[in-house]
Image (tube, rainbow, N blue to C red):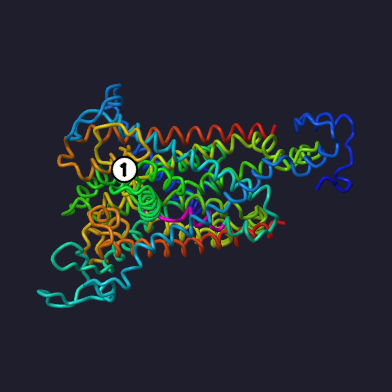
């Protein structure tokens, strides 16, 4: 390694540059050969630094793997550990003693632990769908307004404001739903219970709106101007252009926004934990009943079970399922957005 | 009015949707300010809560949140910046590895926060912590229990995507000419990154750090099982101590307090502090970003 083959990279630069170069390198050596070598590879600590960069770059990959592995590690022993729980009971109804018919029940604490996770997923689904019912029209409506109608000055207020909404911690949204929304909704509709799926889903909508808005607005904004102008030039009215040209062109992006918003809503914990009432009732079509979600169940119960219990394992199993569902939704959403952007950039060329 | 007929309908409908969203944000801010502001005083910010949590201040919660996010920042920034450097400066175009890293970052951003909590408990507390305990031969858990160290590391993993994505964007905004000028002057690639690329991207990187801090300071679900405490009579001084936290304090007071009405002033005061922290951090991020963009353009 003492001899460096002379290539054009090692050709001496003009004198002026060379003085600058050697002062940047801060090398005290007059030996031009060693200077050349240093210039190409740098001192040892540079190589060490580069290695460190490459190793640290793998952290995100490692993190995803570790998250899956270590949540699974706490959940998996349920398959072979001796316990009174039958795996089928997690999913299918069972007729317990003193019950008239087979039922889906989540009652993990008690003399006979009943751990059927169907009511929990139903609660999650109910609150999530309701939240999207509020969030989707509002978020997409705002995105259309901001991308199609709003003058620049208005846009420069609305976009940061929605970013601000995205920055509101979810515990604050939960607090808002619990302390204020719940009372308002109860007074307005005359509901028997303050905390219910409806209130939780309204709070949850606030958490999801920024996600759906940002991605939809990006997609609408990325639609090439030419499409819009061509439509207007052909005599289409502005609403026709917006709804029949711009919106369809951005539709995959908007769909992805809804999918990613759905994923966010399923995984959201604090809002539903604080505002949903947390009773695991099977009332899939009653928005005013209480609901218990998967996330809220983990958050409330994990603190009270001892390490290694069947109940503990089931809670981690719920975590694994949550991880898998959001992982898939996320992959779909990201893939759709990426494809749309490729298509639109190709179209605008 | 410029719009008529159905044009007017669409304009009005979408405009109303926008107003409604902004209105909700306004209501949240307004109510929290209105009910929270009377609770805020120097004493509230600098004293400890009374034992029934309905009175006193929130100093331990502020202190805990600050310590937590500081530790998190120390852990997440080097790794996040290094990943972004790898992605922009070292990975060859269309590199498979870079594709995998990017996909992992996107997925990490979509993992529910409660799953981070399970991961923190399962990996940091039970695996790393218990392993350390058996290595030092402790009979009582020393490391293998919830602690501020484990919470901050969990949050570091959670905020990693924020730092990576904003830093990558900042590094890409540095003009190619600057890199090439440095290389032409004989700098090594690593040297050009350290002395030219990073300093020019520092505004963007700082934005990422601030956004990560804002996100990390507000998350509650990941710290419930990994270190947050309902009430602590002392300020944590050790990495292995538990800690109080503004967000967790809000959650605990609002849902577990025996007397929520009595706790209401404290509760609103705490929410106001938490909200001000995250809003001012977001504002700082916006300002830094627009400034650094302007200076790069110049």
**What residue sits right under mark 1 in the picture?**
B228
The x, y position of residue B74, in whole percent, is: 49, 38
Q: Quadrant of the C terminus of chain A?
A: bottom right
Classify A245 as above or below A100.
Answer: above
Counting from the top left corner in percent of width and height, residue A169 is at 38, 43
Helix, strand or loop under label 1: loop
The outermost residue toward the front is B137
Q: Determine whether, in the image, residue A176 is placed left or right of residue B111.
A: left
Q: Is residue A299 left or right of residue B7?
A: left
Q: Is residue B113 visible?
A: no
Q: Is residue B108 magenta?
A: yes
Secondary structure character of the magenta stretch overall: helix
Task: Tell me residue B146's x, y (percent).
Answer: 32, 46
Residue depicted at 38% across the width and 58% down the height:
A132
Nearer-the-camera pick, A120 or B3? A120
Name the residue furthest top.
Answer: B42
Q: Is residue B274 left or right of residue B82?
A: left
Disc 1 is attached to a residue of which chain? Answer: B
**Which one is in front, B250 or A54?**
A54
Please give the name of the residue rendered at 85% of the width and 39% of the height, measured from the top-left corner. Answer: A33
Q: Quadrant of residue B178?
A: top right
Span colored in magenta: B103-114
Q: Is residue A96 visible?
A: yes
Q: Residues within 10 Å of mark 1 (few under 14, many from 20)?
A: many
Q: Nearer the viewer, residue B2 or B34?
A: B34
Up/down of A327 relative to B286, above or below: below
Q: Image quarter for residue A32? A: top right
Q: Work out whether residue A192 or residue B144 is closer to the camera in this orientation and state it.
A: B144
| Residue furthest out toward the left | A98
């Amino acid at each position: 390694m003492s001899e460096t083959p002379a290539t054009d990279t090692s050709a001496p630069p003009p004198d002026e540059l060379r003085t600058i170069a050697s002062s940047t390198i801060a090398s005290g050596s007059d030996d031009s050969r060693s200077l050349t070598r240093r210039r190409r590879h740098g001192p040892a600590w540079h190589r060490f630094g580069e290695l460190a960069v490459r190793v640290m770059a793998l952290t995100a990959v490692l993190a995803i793997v570790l998250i899956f592995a270590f949540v699974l590690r706490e959940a998996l022993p349920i398959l072979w550990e001796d316990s009174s729980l039958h795996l089928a009971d997690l999913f299918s109804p069972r007729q317990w003693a003193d019950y008239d018919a087979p039922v889906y029940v989540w009652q993990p604490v008690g003399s006979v632990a009943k751990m059927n996770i169907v009511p929990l997923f139903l609660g999650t689904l109910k609150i999530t769908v309701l939240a999207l019912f509020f969030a989707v029209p509002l978020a997409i409506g705002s995105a259309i307004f901001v991308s199609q109608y709003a003058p620049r000055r208005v846009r420069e207020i609305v976009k940061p404001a929605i970013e601000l909404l995205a920055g509101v911690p979810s515990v604050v949204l939960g607090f808002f739903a619990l302390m204020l929304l719940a009372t308002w909704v109860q007074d307005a509709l005359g509901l028997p219970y303050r905390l219910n799926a409806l209130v939780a889903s309204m709070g949850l909508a606030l958490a999801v709106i920024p996600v759906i808005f940002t991605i939809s607005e990006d997609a609408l904004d990325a639609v090439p101007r030419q499409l819009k102008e061509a439509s207007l030039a052909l005599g289409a009215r502005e609403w026709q252009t917006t709804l029949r040209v711009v919106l369809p062109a951005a539709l995959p992006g908007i769909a992805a926004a809804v999918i990613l918003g759905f994923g966010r809503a399923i995984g959201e914990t604090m809002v539903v934990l604080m505002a949903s009432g947390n009773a695991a009732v099977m009332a899939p079509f009653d928005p005013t009943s209480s609901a218990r979600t998967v996330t809220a169940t983990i958050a409330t119960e994990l603190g009270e079970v001892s390490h290694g219990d069947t109940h503990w394992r089931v809670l981690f199993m719920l975590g694994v399922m949550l991880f898998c569902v959001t992982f898939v939704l996320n992959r779909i959403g990201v893939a759709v957005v990426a494809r749309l952007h490729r298509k639109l950039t190709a179209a605008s060329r | 009015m410029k719009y008529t007929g159905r044009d007017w309908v669409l304009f009005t409908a979408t405009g109303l949707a926008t107003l409604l969203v902004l209105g909700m944000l306004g209501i949240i801010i307004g109510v929290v300010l209105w009910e929270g502001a009377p609770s805020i005083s120097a004493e509230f910010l600098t004293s400890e809560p009374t034992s029934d949590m309905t009175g006193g201040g929130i100093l331990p919660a502020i202190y805990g949140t600050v310590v937590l996010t500081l530790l998190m920042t120390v852990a997440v920034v080097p790794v996040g910046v290094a990943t972004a450097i790898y992605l922009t400066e070292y990975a060859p175009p269309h590199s498979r590895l870079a594709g995998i890293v990017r996909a992992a970052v996107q997925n990490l951003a979509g993992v529910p926060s409660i799953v981070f909590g399970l991961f923190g408990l399962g990996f940091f507390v039970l695996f790393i912590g218990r392993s350390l305990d058996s290595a030092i031969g402790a009979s009582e858990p020393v490391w293998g229990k919830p602690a501020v160290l484990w919470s901050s590391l969990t949050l570091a993993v959670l905020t990693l995507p924020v730092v990576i994505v904003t830093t990558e964007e900042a590094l890409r905004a540095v003009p190619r000419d600057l890199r090439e000028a440095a290389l032409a002057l004989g700098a090594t690639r690593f040297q050009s990154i350290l002395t030219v690329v990073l300093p020019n991207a520092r505004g963007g990187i700082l934005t990422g750090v601030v956004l990560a801090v804002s996100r990390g300071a507000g998350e509650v679900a990941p710290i419930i099982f990994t270190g947050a405490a309902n009430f602590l009579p002392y300020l944590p001084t050790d990495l292995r101590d538990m800690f109080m936290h503004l967000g967790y304090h809000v959650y605990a007071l609002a849902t577990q307090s025996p007397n929520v009405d009595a706790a209401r002033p404290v509760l609103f005061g705490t929410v106001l502090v938490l909200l001000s922290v995250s809003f001012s951090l977001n504002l700082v991020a916006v300002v830094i970003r627009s400034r650094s963009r302007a200076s790069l353009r110049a």
